[in-house]
Amino acid sequence: MANDGDTASSTPEAAPGPIPVMQQVLDSPFLLLFLGVTLPTVLYLIWGVMEIISVPLAD
Amino acid sequence: MTAIDAGAIGVAGEAPARVAKYRTCRFTGLRIEAQAEALIKVNAVAAVVFLAIGGLFGLLVALTRWQAVHLLGAEWFYLVLTAHGANVLLFWIIFFEIAVLYFASAVLLGARLAAPRMAWLGFVLMVAGALMANYAVLEGNSSVMFTSYPPMMASPWFYLSLILFAVGALVGVAVFFGTLMVARQEKTYDGSIPLVTFGALTAAIIAVFTIASGAIILIPTLLWSLGFVSNIDSLMYKLVWWGMGHSSQQINVSAHVAIWYAIGAMVLGARPLSEKVSRMAFLMYILFLQLASAHHLLAEPGLSSQWKIVNTSYMMYLAVMGSMIHGLTVPGAIEAAQRRNGFTRGAFEWLRKAPWCNPAFSGMFLSLVMFGFIGGISGVVLGTEQLNVLMHNTLYVPGHFHGTVVAGTTLAFMAMTYLVVPLIFQRDILWPRMATWQPVLFGIGAGGISMFMMGAGTLGVARRHWDTTFTDAPHAFEHAPGAFLMLGLNGIFAVIAAIGGIMFVVNVVASILVGPKLGGAQTRPLTFPLHQQAAEAASTYGSHATVKLPGTIILVGLFFSAFVLYYFVNWKYLSELWLFR
Ligand code: HEM
Ligand SMILES: [Cu+2]
């Protein structure tokens, strides 16, 4: 199989040294779960419910 | 890598009562635990059964909207439409997704499934819910359609069935998180989880918000249908319901993007161009995609423009950016892999010489293209507050989401099934020729119904409407004749999609039951072979950095031009409706 020279696949991203912060965040499923539930709960649900509640009632 | 050891490898787990049994896959070398395998099987089978039922209902709906055929009467139309939505969008998709979660955790990480008893309980709840929902709808008192907006009221069985199904799915999601923990503790992988698993994690996270929203709204609605609650505010219902209804579509997107990466890896040995970039794109989904639930409420009074625009524009575009990144990196990874496989000539040899006869590949690639061009572009247009008024509640809406959830998700899941049957059921595909044509036929059908429903919607035809000609209306109204042409074409392509769907179901069921055996001492090769590095590419963390991707750049350029053009054509169209002179 003719190869393109760049077979040096799978870059050694797990190189020794401290793991970058962002990678640590992405490696924490429960932190991501927390963020992924909180953000829509606040911006979409809670804010939306507040707006609906503040619609004045007709009498 | 060709040895089979189906025996028990004792693993020191927390509960010594249950010793996990593993086998080693002869094709990938992956270690597959028996309970995970059994649960993937039952969930996949249930999924296919409900696709068959729901797809048939879809055909009946399309044949009714084809005015020359107008198959069903009005009562049956709304009943069948309700049954269609629930069976395909809930039961087919979510059973399959639970199978994907177990595959991406237990199989790809080589771990045992956490709490298999719970997983079985979840499965039983889901089956009970799905059967009960079909009973409730077919009985005739729950023709409330997919959104079930109050004040329309279904029978209590309907709401109860959805709650049972959702609880079952939540149990499945919890088992997925548990399995990630087990894999980490038992050190079945090093470093970070592979990208496919990360995509599944994204889907699982969104599922938690989805199911929580569903519980918040369906429980009071059940009580209302039983007479314990006197009134459900319809706007409040819509708000919370769409937290579930929209977010569940984002589970689908995350799951099928993960599957695109998985199929690229398994069939072509494709690795992500950059794990970092792709994972950031999934992070955009986790953070922002669910906010777009608000695009279903763009026409509601009572919610401010600030709320609408923050949730559907500023923040939402970050999630769209996530999709654009995947739209670049998925074909990019495939091009890079194909160039490594030796197809280096010109801009497109990698694509021309791709394994088009392999239904896993062709289904995946068609899903990618149609999801982007049909579902994606129309979605951004519909989700823009100003443009939304052009198409709100017309057939354009089902046109758009058949582009995402049928041409995109369903086709991707079908493609994946062609790998699941040999690798998990250990049966080869019984009719390879039929399998080769199936994604093409289904793709043409699905693409067709999406486009023609969008066409009819652009001409003003309402969605969910039995009486397109307004025969009983006090004021006569006539659609442009083109509208009926669109509905007729929709009917024809619905038949094509249905044929493609039947070919899928028949071939998969037959292969599982009587397909050539691959397990045990068999040495039979696969009809649709995997790449030599399939397992490594799919199940380990790591990138293949390449920037030399001329073909992908051209494809992406084409996509952008189509996107920009269509977006501005719609603004132009809008400006003609609102003449400020
Ligand atoms: C043979 C394939 C299919 C055909 C011919 C088909 C056709 C249709 C048609 C004509 C409508 C009704 C439009 C209207 O009058 O409002 C519809 C609605 C719908 N379809 Fe499909 N469809 C198919 C497959 C699917 C699949 C695979 C999914 C999901 C994964 C899906 C999800 C839906 C949903 C959610 C609705 C809306 C139901 C509602 O308004 O309550 N369809 N489909
Ligand atoms: Cu939506």
Image (cartoon, grey):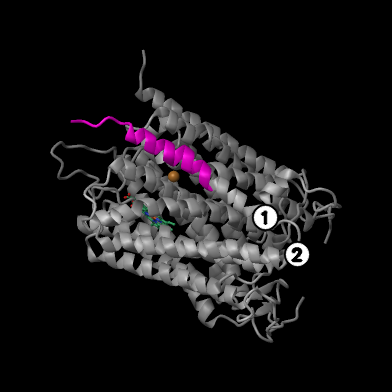
Q: Compute the Cα span from label 2 to label 1.
A: 16 Å
Judging from the image, mark 2 belongs to the subunit labelled B
In terms of image quadrants, where is residue B105?
bottom right
Residue sticking out furthest to the bottom: B521
Residue sticking out furthest to the top: B581
Residue sticking out furthest to the left: B474
**For the point 39% across and 54% down, which residue is it?**
B215
Instruction: Inspect this view and state whether residue B451 appears.
Output: no
Q: Which residue is mark 2?
A: B533
Judging from the image, mark 1 belongs to the subunit labelled B
**For the point 52% across and 44% down, which residue is it?**
A38
Residue toward you, B276 or B11: B11
Residue toward you, B311 or B342: B311
Q: Quadrant of the C terminus of chain B?
A: top left
Amino acid type indicated by mark 1: Leu
Whether labels 2 and 1 belong to a single chain: the reply is yes
Say whether residue A36 is left or right of residue B345: left
Q: Does residue B511 lie above or below B83 as drawn?
A: below
Mark in the foreground, 2 or 1:
1
Q: Position of residue A37 (x, y in %)?
A: 52, 47
Residue range (magenta): A37-59
Q: Position of residue B334 (x, y in %)?
A: 69, 53
Say whether residue B156 is left or right of residue B39: left
Q: Position of residue B382 (x, y in %)?
A: 43, 37
Q: Which residue is mark 1?
A: B195
